[in-house]
């Protein structure tokens, strides 16, 4: 289970852990890449796959597609400094098969809202707490990347993962979501042990409790 945006009351050290993470690349660059890859993966879903299960156990492909649109909309709202809960977690008003079309304006709005470099140091409200924009971008890069993997796995796709981007996300998420804090208020399954030499995307999703 991976619903970073629903962490309303994480352990007190989690927001600080994310905020303190080093960023060797502008986090907006990674966020933009994650938005783009999620959109391409969503656009390739076929109608006969809507009812297929995904590695995120409570979502089938239909529900996950709706959730992804909700996530991309929420990223813009957060960037504007608004209430993240003003955007539903699911785009229930969108008809089956129209998620990719809805993604396009959502992705465009993310690019516009996050274009200001000043957003990186601005304090933004996420469902998990208040974080600087740089940390918020990293949190949602993780959210989008893991759910893109979920969707790709469910629909037989093999996205062109960027190993360097994934390694940067791993560096952040291991600080934000330590293995020992699973359960209770942290809606993630136990970390799945993998060989350290496993592909970066496998290590990322395993940290979120997936079995690659």
Image (spheres, rainbow, N blue to C red):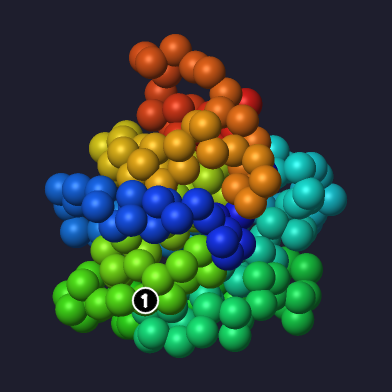
Outermost residue on the front side: it is: 12
- Kindly indicate the quadrant of the structure image that contains residue 82: bottom left
**Identity of the residue drawn at 75% across and 81% down:** 93
- Kindly indicate the quadrant of the structure image that contains residue 173: top left
**Identity of the residue drawn at 29% across and 68% down:** 132
Closest to the observer: 116 or 83?
83
Whether 122 is drawn above or below 175: the answer is below
Q: Is residue 184 left or right of residue 142?
A: right
Secondary structure at badge 1 equals strand
Whether 17 is drawn above or below 6: the answer is above
**Identity of the residue drawn at 62% across and 26% down:** 211
Q: Is residue 63 left or right of residue 25?
A: right
Q: Is residue 171 left or right of residue 183?
A: left
| Res 155 visible | no
Q: Which residue is mark 1?
A: 124
Q: Which percent across, then down, holds residue 153? A: 63, 37
Q: Which percent across, then down, holds residue 11? A: 50, 52
Q: Which percent across, then down, holds residue 197? A: 37, 14
């Amino acid at each position: 289970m991976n619903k970073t945006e629903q962490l309303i009351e994480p352990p007190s050290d989690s927001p600080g852990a994310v905020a303190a993470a080093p960023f060797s690349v502008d986090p907006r660059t990674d966020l933009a890449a994650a938005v783009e890859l999620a959109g391409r993966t969503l656009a390739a879903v076929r109608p006969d796959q809507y009812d297929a299960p995904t590695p995120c156990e409570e979502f089938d492909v239909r529900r996950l597609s709706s959730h992804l649109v909700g996530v991309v909309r929420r990223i813009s709202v957060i960037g504007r400094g608004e209430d993240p809960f003003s955007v539903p977690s699911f785009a229930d008003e969108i008809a089956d098969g129209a998620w990719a079309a809805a993604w396009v304006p959502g992705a465009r709005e993310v690019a516009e809202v996050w274009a200001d470099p000043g957003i990186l140091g601005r304090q933004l409200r996420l469902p998990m707490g208040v974080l600087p924009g740089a940390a918020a971008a990293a949190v949602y890069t993780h959210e989008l990347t893991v759910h893109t993997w979920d969707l790709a796995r469910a629909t037989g796709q093999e996205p062109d993962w960027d190993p360097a981007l994934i390694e940067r996300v791993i560096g952040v998420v291991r600080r934000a979501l330590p293995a020992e804090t699973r359960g209770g208020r942290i809606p993630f399954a136990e970390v799945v042990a993998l060989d350290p030499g496993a592909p970066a995307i496998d290590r990322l999703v395993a940290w979120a409790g997936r079995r690659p």
